[in-house]
Image (cartoon, coloured by chain):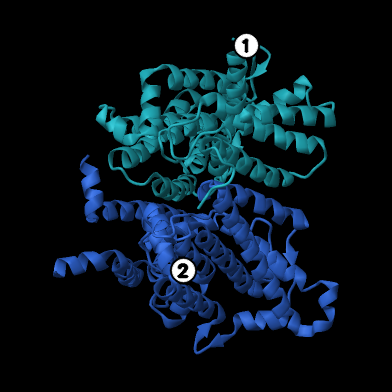
Chain colours: A cyan, B blue
């Protein structure tokens, strides 16, 4: 009995390599700087990771279904600019739902192209990255967007507000992660997402509608992007057209770091959250140790490749590829 | 027979038809919409267009080889910046101070070697670890950019050498230096893909990897060679570009990977590998540059360019699916 239990523990450790790395980093940073584990610091890290984190939740769905989404960065710029502009024209009550509808429309368009027309998701979303950026610039006329009267509105609640002693972005992140985590792990829809990404042929023969599942994944991604845009807009109350530029690859890095395979069929919401937190804590830990921000780029590079390499070599049973 | 011939050649010649369409459209539309007096199809304008397509074009040539082989390289923008920094900075190093203008050659070699080395690192990681090239180069895109910043912080690296600037601005047989480098890379890589064992093997690997392995082709070394080539070409592109401008900003080259991939895909190269040509890529590069210039000429702003290029990419992908018989069958499943 004891033997079996020990084996099970070992498999769990093997599967949770990224979690162990995460702990290791926390310990190193905590030893290096006493402020690192203070409640204020932890809160500020999670708070600044919340925007990327919310986007990563949606991208996790897309990646598990076997596709990519490179358009989330420019889509997030779009929703930020739109909600800021509409805030002054329609007021926050109408601006927020309108922005969500417009972003979902874009997500639905991508979902239609990738799901129903079966176009390659990498190129479609690459094209949409450029197209949505153009759309944003056309919408704003190239100008920065600002809310005229910043003090007299409750719009700042989503980015600056606090509830139950926690900043609202963190609460939104946790709520969304919990909801999407349950959706992915515990519902028939979640199983379909894994099936479509893991083995499309088997899924097709089992009568699982690939097109509709992929379409829904892109809608979920767009919903998350809209939420991220809302947090960003509400926090800064003003924005450039390029606010989300480059986020798509950072988000993807976090999702991959969490152990999702680009081939689809694997990954979980919890692991994506861990991936985001690792990136956030590395950035913060290096800053606290007085290292410049670009050192984290190099460290992220090494961690991503090591994480994926260990994952792959565990699956094939050998460290080095044999070709 | 004839329909076969058309089908076979449509994917490669479509981009040139599109370029002719663009030329006609902008010339005619320009008569009514443009505020400038000059004709769009002016010789000087076209020469400038070729010169401006060179930085993206030279990298796109290498990307064609990578994508034919079934891989992708997202780190080219960062390699571009590193090579630029190596070239400009090495000209100021004390140990080369006695060389006079010969230092240019030394710094060019150093920059090109740096590019090839960074490419080799990517290739070796892809080969030895078996991690997907998309992930490896996504990581090294961040990592190499970090190296760029480590070099000089957030400050630009600048050094002007007037001999070098003269060389970059020089013209030979009416074409600019940059244009010659673009033409040279296209020619060399075209010869490589057509007439060398390495080139043919790259297509074989991209088309059917398992079959290539079974046929005794060593997949790994070919991948590494391709990554070395694209690293070298990204450095060559930087060397040509920064010879003229003389200053590297640490953010330079960002989003180049996306422009390059767009050009290659427009040129008819398949993402899945095994098919595509350097000539098509040249067409893709020129088509994008024409679109940018043409839309500017008829008074549209940059936002429209982004919108149009993005939508064209999707339309091309859609038409490709419809024309491709295999793709059309998949569409019905």
Left or right for A202, reference B165: left
Give the alpha-carbon distance from disc 1 to disc 2, as whole Å.
56 Å
Q: Horizontal and vertical percent for residue A190?
A: 40, 23
Kindly identify the residue that appears in the image at 62 percent across and 24 percent down: A13
Q: Residues within 10 Å of mark 2 (few under 14, many from 20)?
A: some
One can see residue B301 in this view:
no
Relative to A215, residue A320 above or below: below
Circle 1 is placed at which residue position?
A2
A130 vs B191, nearest the viewer: B191
Query: Helix or strand or loop: what does disc 1 sit on?
Result: helix
Q: Horizontal and vertical percent for residue A55?
A: 52, 33
Label ID, residue B308: none
Residue at the bottom extreme, as displayed: B173
Labels 1, 2: front one:
1
Q: Horizontal and vertical percent for residue A78?
A: 48, 40
B29 vs B245, nearest the viewer: B245
Circle 2 is placed at which residue position?
B198
Q: Horizontal and vertical percent for residue B206?
A: 40, 57
Q: Quadrant of residue B300?
A: bottom left
Kindly identify the residue that appears in the image at 70 percent across and 80 percent down: B105
Question: Pointer 1 and pointer 2: residues touching (CB < 8 Å)?
Answer: no
Q: Quadrant of residue B159?
A: bottom right
Q: Chain of mark 2?
A: B
Left or right for A293, reference B285: right
Relative to B283, residue A241 above or below: above
């Amino acid at each position: 009995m004891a033997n079996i239990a020990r084996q099970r523990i070992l498999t769990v450790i093997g599967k949770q390599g990224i979690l162990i790395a995460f702990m290791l980093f926390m310990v190193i940073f905590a030893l290096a700087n006493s402020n690192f584990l203070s409640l204020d610091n932890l809160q500020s890290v999670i708070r600044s990771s919340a925007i990327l984190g919310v986007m990563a939740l949606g991208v996790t769905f897309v990646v598990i279904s076997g596709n990519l989404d490179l358009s989330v960065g420019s889509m997030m710029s779009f929703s930020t600019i739109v909600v800021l502009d509409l805030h002054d024209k329609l007021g926050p009550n109408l601006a927020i739902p309108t922005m969500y509808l417009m972003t979902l429309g874009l997500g639905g368009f991508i979902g239609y192209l990738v799901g129903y027309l079966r176009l390659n998701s990498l190129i479609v979303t690459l094209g949409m990255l450029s197209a949505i950026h153009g759309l944003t610039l056309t919408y704003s006329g190239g100008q920065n967007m600002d809310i005229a009267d910043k003090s007299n509105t409750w719009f700042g609640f989503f980015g600056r507000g606090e509830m139950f002693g926690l900043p609202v972005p963190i609460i939104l992140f946790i709520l969304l992660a919990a909801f999407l985590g349950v959706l992915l792990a515990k519902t028939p829809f979640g199983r379909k997402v894994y099936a479509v990404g893991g083995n499309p042929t088997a899924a097709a023969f089992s009568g699982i509608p690939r097109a509709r599942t992929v379409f829904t994944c892109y809608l979920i991604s767009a919903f998350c992007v809209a939420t991220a845009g809302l947090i960003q807009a509400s926090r800064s109350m003003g924005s450039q057209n390029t606010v989300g530029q480059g986020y798509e690859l950072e988000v993807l890095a976090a999702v991959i770091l969490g152990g999702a395979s680009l081939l689809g069929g694997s990954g979980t919401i919890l692991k994506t959250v861990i991936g985001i937190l690792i990136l956030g804590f590395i950035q913060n830990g290096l800053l606290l140790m007085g290292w410049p921000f670009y050192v984290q780029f190099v460290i992220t590079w090494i961690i991503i490749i090591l994480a994926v390499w260990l994952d792959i070599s565990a699956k094939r049973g050998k460290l080095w590829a044999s070709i | 027979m004839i329909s076969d011939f058309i089908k076979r050649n449509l994917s490669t010649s479509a981009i040139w038809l599109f370029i002719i369409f663009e030329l006609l459209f902008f010339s005619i539309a320009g008569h009514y919409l443009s505020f400038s007096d000059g004709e769009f199809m002016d010789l000087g304008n076209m020469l400038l267009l070729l010169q401006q397509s060179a930085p993206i074009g030279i990298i796109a040539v290498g990307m064609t080889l990578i994508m034919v082989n079934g891989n992708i390289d997202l780190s080219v923008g960062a390699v571009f910046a590193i090579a630029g920094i190596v070239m400009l900075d090495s000209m100021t190093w004390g140990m080369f101070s006695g060389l006079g203008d010969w230092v240019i050659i030394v710094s060019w070699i150093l920059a090109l070697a740096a590019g090839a080395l960074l490419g080799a690192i990517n290739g070796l990681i892809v080969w030895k670890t078996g991690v997907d090239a998309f992930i490896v180069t996504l990581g090294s895109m961040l990592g190499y950019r970090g190296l760029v910043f480590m070099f000089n912080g957030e400050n630009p690296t600048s050094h002007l050498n007037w001999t070098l600037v003269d060389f970059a601005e020089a013209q030979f047989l009416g074409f600019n230096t940059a244009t010659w480098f673009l033409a040279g890379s296209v020619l060399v890589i075209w010869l490589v893909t057509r007439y060398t064992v390495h080139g043919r093997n790259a297509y074989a690997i991209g088309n059917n990897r398992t079959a290539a392995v079974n046929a005794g082709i060593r997949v790994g070394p070919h991948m590494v060679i391709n990554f070395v080539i694209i690293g070298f070409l990204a450095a060559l592109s930087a060397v040509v570009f920064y010879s003229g401008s003389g200053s590297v900003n640490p953010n330079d080259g960002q989003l180049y990977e996306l422009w390059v991939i767009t050009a290659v895909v427009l040129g008819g190269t398949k993402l899945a590998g095994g098919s595509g040509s350097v000539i098509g890529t040249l067409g893709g590069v020129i088509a994008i540059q024409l679109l940018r210039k043409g839309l500017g000429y008829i008074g549209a702003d940059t936002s429209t360019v982004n919108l149009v290029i993005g939508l064209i990419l999707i339309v091309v992908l859609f038409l490709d699916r419809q024309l491709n018989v295999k793709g059309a069958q998949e569409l019905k499943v």
